[in-house]
Amino acid sequence: MAEVDGGFRTLDEQSLIDYISATPAVSSRLGNDLEGISVKEVGDGNLNFVYIVSNSSGGSVVIKQAIPYIRCIGESWPMTKERAYFEALTLREHGRLCTAHVPEVYNFDRNLSLIAMRYVEPPHIILRKGLIAGIEYPLLAEHMSEYMARTLFFTSLLFRSTTEHKREVANYCGNVELCRLTEQVVFSDPYKVSQYNRTSPYLDHDAEIVREDDILKLEVAGLKSMFCERSQALIHGDLHTGSVMVTTESTQVIDPEFAFYGPMGFDIGAFVGNLILAFFSQDGHTDGGKDRIAYKEWILKTIEDTWNLFHKKFICLWNENRDVGEAYLVDVYKKPELLLLVQGKYMKDLFHDSLGFGAAKMIRRIVGVAHVEDFES
Amino acid sequence: MAEVDGGFRTLDEQSLIDYISATPAVSSRLGNDLEGISVKEVGDGNLNFVYIVSNSSGGSVVIKQAIPYIRCIGESWPMTKERAYFEALTLREHGRLCTAHVPEVYNFDRNLSLIAMRYVEPPHIILRKGLIAGIEYPLLAEHMSEYMARTLFFTSLLFRSTTEHKREVANYCGNVELCRLTEQVVFSDPYKVSQYNRTSPYLDHDAEIVREDDILKLEVAGLKSMFCERSQALIHGDLHTGSVMVTTESTQVIDPEFAFYGPMGFDIGAFVGNLILAFFSQDGHTDGGKDRIAYKEWILKTIEDTWNLFHKKFICLWNENRDVGEAYLVDVYKKPELLLLVQGKYMKDLFHDSLGFGAAKMIRRIVGVAHVEDFES
Ligand SMILES: Nc1ncnc2c1ncn2[C@@H]1O[C@H](COP(=O)(O)OP(=O)(O)O)[C@@H](O)[C@H]1O
Ligand SMILES: Nc1ncnc2c1ncn2[C@@H]1O[C@H](COP(=O)(O)OP(=O)(O)O)[C@@H](O)[C@H]1O
Ligand SMILES: [Mg+2]
Ligand SMILES: [Mg+2]
Ligand SMILES: [Mg+2]
Ligand SMILES: [Mg+2]
Ligand SMILES: [Mg+2]
């Protein structure tokens, strides 16, 4: 218990066990059996602590705790631990909307900024690692398009009333610190000289080209404004390939602590942009003569399928729920050819936004603070 | 005191006087002299009660009270009286940013939804009436461009941090009922058959053309989404020519009860669109042989000057405050030609939005629920 702050304390393995035994909503997931309990810290992420807790009778639970700073940087970069509240809220909301692809939340403790959730068990691994290992996931596009279509559609004004929408927008405005982190590391730092950008002599020239590209910076200004101003849907906010756990049969989206009401294209772009990074990094992974040509084809096909399936599912949800949301009242847009026109425009704009945000996410992974393992392993 | 609701009661002239004498912040504006006090209800607006209170020694104050429904329709259309809170908040915020053109708030009573403010004294009249009477206001464009440039610039991310911005956005999400009224009467009802649209046999055909125009409805869908989703600045929200009081020397903007964080173009478009309506209505006002040709020229020039002066002032504020806001960090956009490029794009988009919203506001005044006196007097 390193720290005390209004009931908050950073848990260690022992205090975590004490917490679990005192918390029925969690201990019941272990069959109330704390015999032979094992706790393993697995947080390979940048911000938080993640523990896998299991007992000898096969019970398991994952405990994620946010601390009041950015873990990989240290106490010098404070960051509200309230991010755990928004993560838990979003896991629950997105889980309600897309149960198949979001781990169940068992318990949330706001004082401790602590989420107890389903252990996404092996053979699930982080998608980014699967992509580096060259593993094909035949259902990935199907699952991710389903996750994105459902979470984005049902939290947008295509499904919500403006009353519900504004209430939710107001609440998620509270996650401003996490939004600010994105604003800085995605939309600002890569375009200026910043102490936080990680450089390498091999990239200095590229970084400079980015900093000097006026047309690029003009477009990025527009994307940043959209990120800050446009509350289109409850987005995950950090949907790179490190926030997805996979097997060949299952896809689970974790870590929505950056969630807020923002532009849908930010999620789609994050996912697709990170697949494109994975594509380009494949040449660095060719294992002993065995090239990755077929694998690269699979990645390309997955990108294409992701958008096409997303498009199909999203429009399908729209058609099924025409009389629900308040953006396009059925009385105004009932004529089939007008609805087609409106949907066409909506999807074209969304595709455009997604490509823009995807590019911004790729750039920041190359010349910004947080690089990706794809290019570094 | 017709109504009681958690301390709320609709005031009449006598209870208004009782309220004033019990409220030093208001009675002091009358020199604490309630001798020969006179109360005149002047609310010609659609929603609220407005009283001019004056005494025999020349003191005066305006009292505006919101009631829990839409006045001109009645209790069958309930509308939160909390709109008075947002009106008072916005009068104060816009008044701080543009003191010369916003009446001072003396007191706000949230329980009574009651604002005490400066009496914008004669010869001030409502601008719409001045336009119908054919009066030229040589400073109108100068003043309105000043008001819009300052209120919109200083509440946008060109000046604010995203922390301040999200806090304010969240608060103004509470004004959702008023936003919903706009959504309905501006962006939805005119494009469908609605019991609320006021019709005339002379307009039936035009109303039908509007309802059948797919390209128009496609554009209006985009505008409505922008209105619901984009928190660009603290906008007035109802900036037609009935919300402006004028003399040839002075311009005062009243009635911001629809204020929220929305697209800037909605304010600019409302003002300019209503000037365009005034322009087209002039032919109906030609008084006894004296035509309105010169006056129509003046209106056109005022429209042009409003945008051009707004553009100049807005860019000037931007240049003076380059290191303040968080949308365009000075370190990223310091190169003069890049800043020019970014500003050019920003203003071009804003002009485009303003024209779109202006058109929507004009259409709704012709085929929607609330018509304008310009065409009806
Ligand atoms: N529910 C879970 N089941 C299994 N492993 C998990 C779970 N949640 C997180 N992890 C593991 O912990 C790592 C870090 O979790 P993450 O939520 O991404 O934390 P951070 O917010 O710090 O990035 C993940 O990469 C994954 O390996
Ligand atoms: N501060 C004021 N000074 C003088 N007259 C005012 C003032 N505020 C409102 N009025 C008068 O009352 C009318 C209605 O006020 P307004 O604020 O527009 O109410 P509503 O919200 O009902 O439209 C205005 O058109 C104007 O004639
Ligand atoms: Mg993570
Ligand atoms: Mg995270
Ligand atoms: Mg009014
Ligand atoms: Mg009003
Ligand atoms: Mg457009």
Image (spheres, coloured by chain):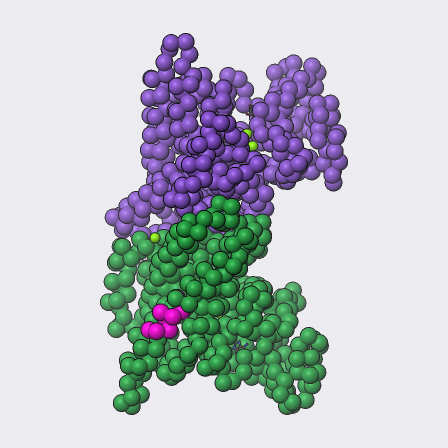
Chain colours: A purple, B green
Q: Relative to A59, is A207 on the left or the right?
A: left
- Residue at image location 54% in from the left, 38% down from the top: A194
Task: Residue B369: tell me if it is visible.
Answer: no
Overall secondary structure of the magenta section: helix
Q: Which residue is farthest top?
A: A288
User: Residue at the location (54% across, 82% down)?
Assistant: B121
Question: Which segment did they paint magenta?
Answer: B300-307
Identity of the residue drawn at 64% across and 66% down: B111
Q: Position of residue A45 (x, y in %)?
A: 57, 27
Pinpoint residue A51: horizontal percent, then vertical percent.
63, 24
Q: Is residue A242 magenta?
A: no
Q: Position of residue A239 (x, y in %)?
A: 48, 33
Looking at the rendering, in which quadrant would you find the N terminus of chain B? bottom right
Question: Residue A208 lies in what quarter of the image?
Answer: top left
Please give the name of the residue rendered at 57% of the width and 36% of the height, measured from the top-left corner: A195
* Up/down of B178 relative to A282, above or below: below
All told, the count of numbered labels is 0
Is residue B222 at all visible to an observer of this figure?
yes
Give the quadrant of ligand 4. Answer: top right
Near-viewer residue (B138 or B262)? B138
Is B304 contained in the magenta span?
yes
Asked if B96 appears above or below A116 in the picture, the reply is below
Residue A181 image position (x, y, % from top left) = 56, 40
| Front residue (pair A26, B298) | B298
The quadrant of the rendering that contains the C terminus of chain B is: bottom left
